[in-house]
Image (cartoon, helix red, strand yellow):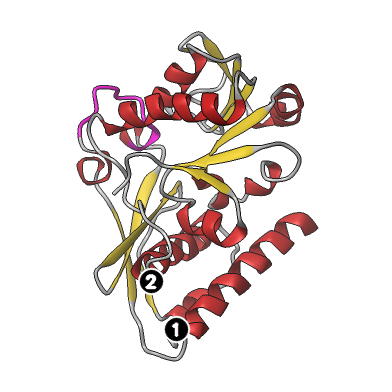
Amino acid sequence: MKVKEDFYSDLVERFKAIVEAHHLLEEEIVITGRTLSVEEAIGNPERRDYPIIKGKEKLMQAEFKGAKGQAFTDMAGDFRGSLQEVLNNPLESNFDRAVLIAAMNAICRYLGLIEKTIHCHDQQPEQCAEELVTFIRREYGSPKIALIGYQPAMLDKLAAVFPLRAVDLDPGNIGKTKSGVRIEGYESTAEVLEWADVIVATGSTVVNSTITDYCREKPAVFFGTTGAATCHLMGLQRFCARGA
């Protein structure tokens, strides 16, 4: 628990330092979050089993002076307040963390510190998954991969090339076989991580507070838009080939 508390405390402090350095903390800045529709969030990809399409997750979006930042969460809702309020808000739920993460992504995008904070659309997730295979080969050779979070295109493309085990939190996926891989539950995480050489994890782990399970002992790559600012601020490796 202390590792988790330290991670988020450090993350908030690093974000606060950036806000203060750009003299944004004392301003009455308003950030609004809203839940995007499926079409807004991901368009119309051929695969229909993405978590956001199935309704298991929602994509919250923060907007700040024209810059947008997103965060996947299973606890979506609206938030309107100042950056000071965002920084002071206790991170007690997935909703609280989603507000922080979406806000961080929008602010860091506005400041030019990060890019690709908007989820890709239509057939771009397939293209991203193909590029991920190339990236893994180039960086790590032929590793055994632990895929954390069910992303159908990535599972399909990675499993065709590398030994792979997959872990997900959705009871609707656990125990089912996808692209020849049996989806395992969170209770199998320690065993899967011990088996793997490289961890490929969804950035939304920073919203559901499991990210500290994956950024310590083995090489880890966090994919997608949710983890954009977190990876930048915490020095974690991120992969996002097709985000906007």
Query: Which residue is found at the position 51% from the left and 15% from the top?
Result: 159
What is the total number of numbered labels drawn onto the structure image? 2
| Above or below, comparing residue 216 to residue 62 in the picture | above
* Left or right relative to 216: residue 211: left
Q: Are marks 1 and 2 in contact (CB under 8 Å)?
A: yes
Query: Do we see residue 1 in this rendering?
Result: no
Query: Do we see residue 136 in this rendering?
Result: yes
Query: Which residue is found at the position 51% from the left and 63% from the top?
Result: 96
Q: Position of residue 16 (x, y in %)?
A: 55, 77
* Left or right relative to 91: residue 161: left
Q: Amino acid at mark 1?
A: His
| Above or below, comparing residue 140 to residue 241 in the picture | above
Mark closest to the chain's N terminus, 1 or 2 = 1
* Part of the protein shown in magenta: 44-52
- Residue identified by numbered label 2: 111
219 part of magenta stretch:
no
| Above or below, comparing residue 9 to residue 54 in the picture | below
* Left or right relative to 93: residue 5: right
Query: Which residue is found at the position 44% from the left and 79% from the top?
Result: 83
Badge 2 marks a residue whose secondary structure is: loop
- Residue identified by numbered label 1: 22
Within the image, what quadrant is residue 104 found in? Answer: bottom left
Q: Main secondary structure of the magenta part?
A: loop
Q: Position of residue 73 (x, y in %)?
A: 45, 49
Residue sticking out furthest to the front: 138
